[in-house]
Image (cartoon, rainbow, N blue to C red):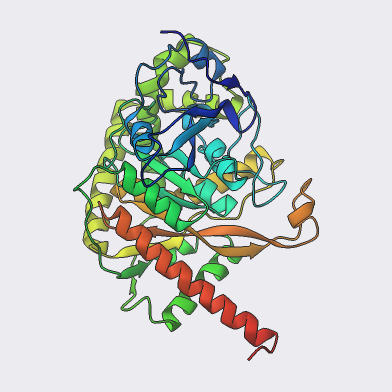
Amino acid sequence: MPEARNARAAVGPIWRVLGDPLVRGAGAGPLAGQAVAVKDLFDVAGHRVGAGVPAYLAGAAPATAHAYAVGALLAAGADVRGIAQTDEFAYSIAGRNPHSGTPANGAVPGALPGGSSSGPATAVALRQASIGLGTDTGGSIRVPASYQGLWGLRSTHGAVPVGGLVPLAPAFDAVGWLARDGGTLRAAVAATLVAGEQRAAPARYAVAPDAVALADPGVGAAFGAALARLGAAGLLGDLAVVDTGDLDELAEAFRTVQAAQAWRVHGAWVRAHPGALGDDVAARFAWARSVTADAAAAAGETLAAARARLEALLGERTLLLPSASSAAPPVDVAGGELDLVRARTMRLTCLAGITGRPALSVPVLSVPVLSVPGGGGHNGGGGSSPVGLCLVGPRCADLALIDMGRRLAAALDLARTATARTDDGTP
């Protein structure tokens, strides 16, 4: 089957293939008029999947059918605008790709976009698409949403069929979506989830001080201020304080199982294509290759015990925490510093992966930024950077979680408006 001709190559930081549209949707439905940026992991009929790796793209055959999630969005009336870039094999949360470049951060000039759903996130942030379709294994929806001030949902693990999707670590891989507003996000999620498997969830919340303490002081302060406003508005009810356990141990176990599965999925290809990957992702695969079966099994046992404990601890409650440990780092951040940012953020994001729960990033926090090297504009001489408020909800309560997030966001917006009026003397 030859590759579709109704597209133009758009090799660049945001798009790999772009159309006008690339694939037209049903024309009518709840998503009519919406344009989707599809992460380059999903099958789009007539097109190849590159997974952020040119050598992988070169050996791929055009897909004969759409991935489930792509087909569901098209059936709901959305158009596929194009295939958007990803970090190599989705094995990064930075948003860098040594082959196609680094997409801009639509909220913070000069900062990293977040990954691995970097292309879809930037396309949405820059209004080149209204919906981003991506994946989240260890934070690849939540981190770019946090860095770029977007709404982003990681679905309940297994809630969306993953046929026609290049995996990274199947035990944790989940379909996710990005949008500029909660209403659009909800419509996209509702159109994609398997009908009849969603349920309600009570608006009962929990907070884990040990997890919040992993964030930068500015992020922790913004998170605390938001909780205070929500509490004053009466929205948090009987907020529970919970102990998530040793997050260093949990994140390391998560990293180990993720690596073992990534090597199982892609190891043969990586061995057969030396030099095909950039240094950062190549180093991750080199470490993944070294993970022994015994180490993977022990890590799996650690995660199983943690999953049972966290489920018993949280029950029907939704855990509140920052979506990332910091605002978006500058594009030219040194590799060692970026590794530290990744490690601290993964200690937060791994909780949803371990439990399989849905996780929503809501763009309601911000932290001051003195400057971003090379940024200018928004942050050239001050300003702020967005950070997401993350809600980790009960399994199969994805839509209810978005509804909770929209209520919390509305309350925080009202609180900010009231504060602004008080500050400027407006009655």
| Image location (x, y in percent) of residue 95 | 58, 38
Find residue 310 and report its image quarter: bottom left
Return the residue found at the far left. Answer: 196
Q: Taking 244 as reference, is 342 left or right?
A: right
Look at the image and tell me whether residue 19 can be seen.
Answer: yes
Please state the total of marks drawn on the protein image: 0
Residue beneath the point at 41% across and 37% down: 27
| Image location (x, y in percent) of residue 166 | 39, 26
**Compared with residue 202, is residue 33 higher up or lower down, i.e. above or below?**
above
**Compared with residue 272, is residue 317 higher up or lower down, i.e. above or below?**
below
Return the residue found at the far front. Answer: 28
**Front residue (pair 391, 66):** 66
Q: Taking 146 as reference, is 211 left or right?
A: left
Location of the C terminus (image quadrant): bottom right
Location of the N terminus (image quadrant): top left
Q: Taking 331 as reference, is 386 left or right?
A: left
| Image location (x, y in percent) of residue 70 | 38, 32
**Front residue (pair 26, 37):** 26
Look at the image and tell me whether residue 225 can be seen.
Answer: no
**Compared with residue 258, is residue 424 higher up or lower down, i.e. above or below?**
below
| Image location (x, y in percent) of residue 347 | 45, 51
